[in-house]
Every structure is written in C-alpha cells, then in structure tokens.
Image: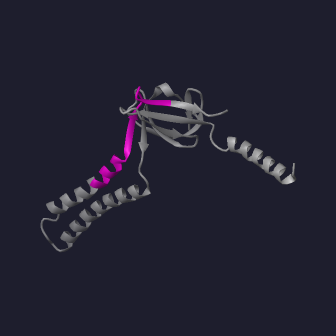
Amino acid sequence: MPSISRNFLLTLLIVNLFYDFSFAQKFLALDIYHVTGNMKRIRFHENDNLTLRIHGSRKFFTHIITFLGDSSIVLDGNWIIPLSEIDKVRIDKSNSLVHTLSRGLIDCGIGFFVLDSFNSLVNNDFPIIKIQAVKESAVLILSGIILQRVMIRKYRINSKRRLKIIDVTF
C-alpha cells in the first residue's frame, strides 16, 4: 500500500473521530405537530438561552441551559427543572433588523410627541399638546410594540407540542 493512501486513510480516521465529538451529543427538542401531519422541531443545545414558564407560575424566565440530563435540564448551573414541570416555552423569532425597526418606531413616537409639544411651548401655541400629535405618536409607538409581539411565539407543552431530550451518542 503506498504511503499516500495510508496517510489519507489515517487522516480520514482522525477526522471521523473528531467529527463525532465536534457537536453536542444531547439537545432539547420542542416538537410541534401540525394538523396536516407535519412536524417542526426546534432545537436547544447547551449554552443556548431558553425562555420558559413553570407550572403554577405566571412569569416567564430566561436562563442559559448548562446541562441536559435524561429527563431534566439544568439552567444557569443551579436550577434543576424536570421536563414535566415546564408549562410553556417562548421562542423569539426576530432578528436584529426587527429589533432595530421596532425600537426605532417606539423612539420616533416618543420623540415626535416631545418635539411637537416643545415646539408648541416655544411658539406659544395653544393647546400645547395637540390631539393629532398624540394620535400620530400613539400609532408609531403601538406599531413598534406590535412588531415586537408578533415575532414572539408561546408554545404550551401538551400532546401536540412535546418537549424531550434527544441523545445522538452512538
């Protein structure tokens, strides 16, 4: 056997060994089953942010996944939460453009209202706060808030939306 092919096979073996260890062996899967029979899977790996709500709570918590067990997850290194205790998972699908646009709309609405009121005060116009300026500012602010809220989905964990830990170790 020539030395080139022996070196090539040795390189392939080493790359294959490192490939198996180069990705996370476990991940948290949120499987969403649709009426049409299709399934969508959202994956969470270690060191990902997870926003969730626990049974009996009304508040969502955002934490970093530090470890995935067999039937529980460890958040921020000290919270051990069984998967059966998770009530809802919140997914933020927005990107930096949506964040910038929504924040800009809210800031423009506040700025427009403040500048219009200040301009009326300087020019001694009455009323200082105009109804038209309030309406225009409210439209800008509300459109920014709606843009933020549209990009966030909440998934209640039930038979159609299952949360499980997948282990892909060979």
- Residue 121 is left or right of residue 47, and the answer is left
User: Which residue occupies the foreground of this view, 25 or 139?
Assistant: 25
Q: Which residues are magenta?
A: 143-163
Counting from the top left corner in percent of width and height, residue 11 is at 78, 49
User: Which residue occupies the foreground of this view, 11 or 98?
Assistant: 11
- Residue 45 is left or right of residue 12, and the answer is left
How many callouts does the rendering have? 0
Question: Quick one: which residue is furthest to the left in this view?
Answer: 126
- Residue 53 is left or right of residue 127, and the answer is right
> Residue at 43% of width from left, 54% of height from top?
95
Q: Quadrant of residue 119?
A: bottom left
> Residue at 39% of width from left, 59% of height from top?
100
Counting from the top left corner in percent of width and height, residue 80 is at 55, 30
Residue 16 on the magenta segment: no
Q: Quadrant of residue 105?
A: bottom left
> Residue at 48% of width from left, 39% of height from top?
42
User: Which residue occupies the foreground of this view, 36 or 133?
Assistant: 36
83 in relation to 10, above or below: above
User: Which residue occupies the foreground of this view, 96 or 62?
Assistant: 96
> Residue at 73% of width from left, 47% of height from top?
15
- Specify the quadrant that holds the C terminus: top right
